[in-house]
Image: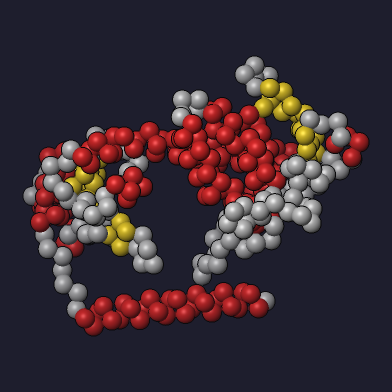
Amino acid sequence: MDKYKEFKKVGTHSGKFHADEVMATAILKQVFEIELTRTRDTEILDKQDFIYDIGNGEFDHHQLEKEYRDNGTPYAASGLIWRKFGRQAILSNHPEVSENEVETIFRYVDAVLIEGIDAADNGIRTTENIIPTMCISSIIGGYNPTWDSPESVDAAFNDAVGFAEDILENLIDQKVSTLKARTFVIEAYNNRKRPELLILDNSYPWERTLKEIDINKEVLFVIYPKEEGFYIQTVREYGEVRRDRKSLPEEWAGKREEELGSIIGIKDAVFCHTARFIAKAGSFDSILKMADIAISKPEPKIENRVAVRNVFDILRLILRNKLVIKIRRNR
């Protein structure tokens, strides 16, 4: 037993499980040493320290009078447990973070993970995609044994909880890492020698911070060391259409090593992605030369007929997406 965690007897319903009670269990395990009972026997449930997703209590959402977030999304068991114990879950693994940082992480995890699970469990469709994409709720639900499987539901539930713990812990760790990196990104931004180029001394997560501080959108490329080399990456704008503020040179696209190096004039080129958003070289001097070329090289002019065609392509995509949504809703 973990001596740093308080022991709690907890209970949820037996039978087929869903992502909300699985993730709720994963959250509780961050805070407490738990003994879990899965049952629908009310006498047994009454003996637990607390129960969730059953019993019409504080952590159930099957009552007629549901609880809702400010944006209208109803709570399910995972959200109710996260609302109560989420901040403790964050501090249990990261006691070094400040009170304000805890709130930032708490809101972030709810927005990108917990709220979607709650919505799905309450019967709300969270995505309408042309390309079918599995969501976290369907992945966790897939841990339920198939009809012809000899595996017990309880064993499958425990496996699902282990998966959910990994997802939750990784998400919290990533956000904590981003917050820690913020200071270094801001310092590098304030000390840059060219307005178009941000040079980092480590592979910090930089995109969100740069978006917040670069209000005039001056930075076009970011350089950082990683994996025995140096990368140059474009700065992307995310809107209805994702685009780079400026792409890497067209003649670099898809080229590698000697071929790429001969174009640039360096001996340690590694690659440039075909989409022209990232490239790698072996040394800092080489990646800096690549940045100089990318910044100074003018963007190729786009003919009006090509631009018009792209607009129509986008319109067709929007119309097709709306048609797919309409067909799915009418099924």
Q: Position of residue 158 (x, y in %)?
A: 70, 37
Would residue 70 be found to the left or right of residue 196 on screen? right
| Residue 48 picture location, percent across and down | 82, 31
The percent position of residue 142, horizontal first and vertical second, equals 67, 52
The outermost residue toward the right is 43
* Residue lying furthest left: 265
- Which image quadrant: the C terminus? bottom right
- Between 111 and 16, the one lying in front of the other is 111
Is 92 on the left-hand or right-hand side of 315? right
Which corner quadrant of the image does residue 267 belong to? top left
The residue at the point 8 percent across, 50 percent down is 265
Furthest toward the front, the residue is 70
Q: Would residue 212 be seen by someone viewing this image from the given angle?
A: yes
Of residues 278 and 260, the one nearer the viewer is 278
Task: Tell me which residue sits at (52%, 49%) in the image.
Answer: 112
Which residue is at the front of the view, 226 or 236?
Answer: 236
